[in-house]
Amino acid sequence: MKHRLAGCRRTGDASPSVFINRTGLRAAFFLCLFAGIALLGLTGGGSAGQVEPGAQAPAGSDPIGQDRELESRSEQAELAPRFLRVDLAGVVSPGSSSYLLDGVAAAAEGGYEGLILVLDTPGGLLESTREISRAFLASDVPVLVYVYPTGARAASAGMFITMSAHVAAMAPGTRIGAAAPVALGGGEQEDGPAMDKKVIEDTAAFARSVAEETGRNADWAELAVREAVSATSSEALELGVIDFIASTEEDLLEQVDGLVLTMADGTERTLRTEGATIDDWDMTIQQRVLMVLGDPNIAYILLMLGLLGLMMELYNPGLIFPAVIGLFMLLLAGIGLNILPVNVGGIVLLVIAVALFVAEIYVTSYGLLALVGVGTMILGSALLMDSTDPDFFVEPDIQVSWGVIIPTVVLMATVAIGLMLFIVYVHRRRGTTGHEGMKGELGRTRTDVGPQGGRVFVHGELWSGVSDREIPAGTEIVVIEVEGLILKVAPKAGGESDDSPQPVQ
């Protein structure tokens, strides 16, 4: 079966002009090395769709017996039905859409009895949801959607995915529904913009068509869109929204054994599940990365790390490494935020917060700008996710966790204020080198020193010195000013005079 891989986007290469030196090249090298290790870790060490071969017989055993045993196992494997399992736990995104479409194709090409989707989602992107629904409705193999474990949800976009399956089941303690585009949740539909009405009408028609195609409660599906109603597993079974309630996957397979299903081409197919085996279909590297970056908390952390890197570069221009790391983090955050419903105002507030932290160095505000920056950063973090975007079917609680926001803001504020105090300390500290470092140094005259000049010994070196009044040789002096290579000195208050002959160099 041919299908289209959804959600694959190409991004043009953006090479910011930076001052290249050896430090920058080293930073870029280690950055690429770190990114490669991280991506390898995300793969989990497995290959998508591979099934482990059966165990080999021990060496030294009877070859004829081995052959017979292998033949028996082969016959049993041919008779036993096989199911392919895919998992979706998180936001519906281009990565998850591509993964599920690949699973449908693999189940059909691999001769599997059916595809089992274990679902727990708060919703996601509208276009990805439509692609998944179309693939399930047109699938050549039965698709079983199982909302699991207890406490899981098939909310918003998840409702469409569940109702698109040939078999819909839920575990006890799960829920389904609330599929209204949240952009219309703030008031009556009549008061909404014309575009919002078009969106909800189109979504309601989509829900009804899917329910009618799979023989489920179309009226309830439409209500889930128009009035954002939801149902528990027992309520959904009573309403004809799902087909079964099952405590485990094994329980589900027992209940559907012998079930006759009508496929997309009108043919009937009887499910065989007795003695069934289940194989797992793994994500590709690209799909796994997109799923990870699609987590609001991950995208937020990457965004804040990127802003932190740029902030450190602005504090001390020329470091290169923080800017390189920051730009890389912002690139990853941009990929993730492109998948999620993002409020541009939240991003603007975060950028303003960083600008306030940097401005604290140059403006004497006694910490006021930094304090306002902290408040702005908290507000921007809270508003970053926009669950009212009509292109997404998500629940309103799709936000960055406060358990992530608070530590991140504290870290950013601590680093910003720490760097600010350090820079202020360095600027106010008396210089220890050059002309500034000579002021206040103690020494001793080697010759008589007056307005016409003389020789003084300061800081282990012999200097030319002048004074407003005559200072005899051997007198302890203090440097009060530096004029080129000539030191202007004065007798040290309470200083002692050395009457011994002074060597003149």
Image (cartoon, rainbow, N blue to C red):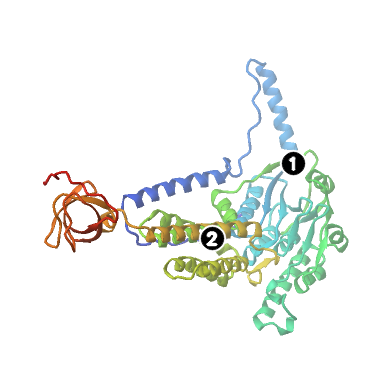
Can you tell which quarter of the image residue 398 is in? Answer: bottom right
Vertically, is 264 above or below 76?
below
Residue at horizontal 64 percent and vertical 25 percent from the top:
56
x then y, percent, for residue 225: 75, 71
Q: Is residue 295 visible?
A: no
Query: Helix, strand, or loop for circle 1?
Result: loop
Q: Nearer the viewer, residue 398 or 54?
A: 398
Mark 2 to mark 1: distance in Å? 58 Å
Give coordinates of residue 201: x percent, y percent: 71, 77
Image height check: is 100 above or below 363? above
User: Which three-letter amino acid code belongs to the residue tagged 2?
Assistant: Ala
Give the image quarter of residue 376: bottom right
Q: Say which residue appears at 59% left-offset and 44% top-offset.
A: 48
The label on residue 413 is 2
The N terminus: image quadrant: bottom right
Q: Nearer the viewer, residue 120 or 275?
A: 120
Label drawn at residue 81: 1
Residue at left offset 41%, top offset 56%? 324
Q: Is residue 225 left or right of residue 59?
A: right
- Please report whichever mark, 2 or 1, sits nearer to the chain's N-terminal start: 1
Residue 136 locus on image (x, y percent): 69, 58
Image coordinates for residue 185, horizontal then vertical, percent: 72, 75
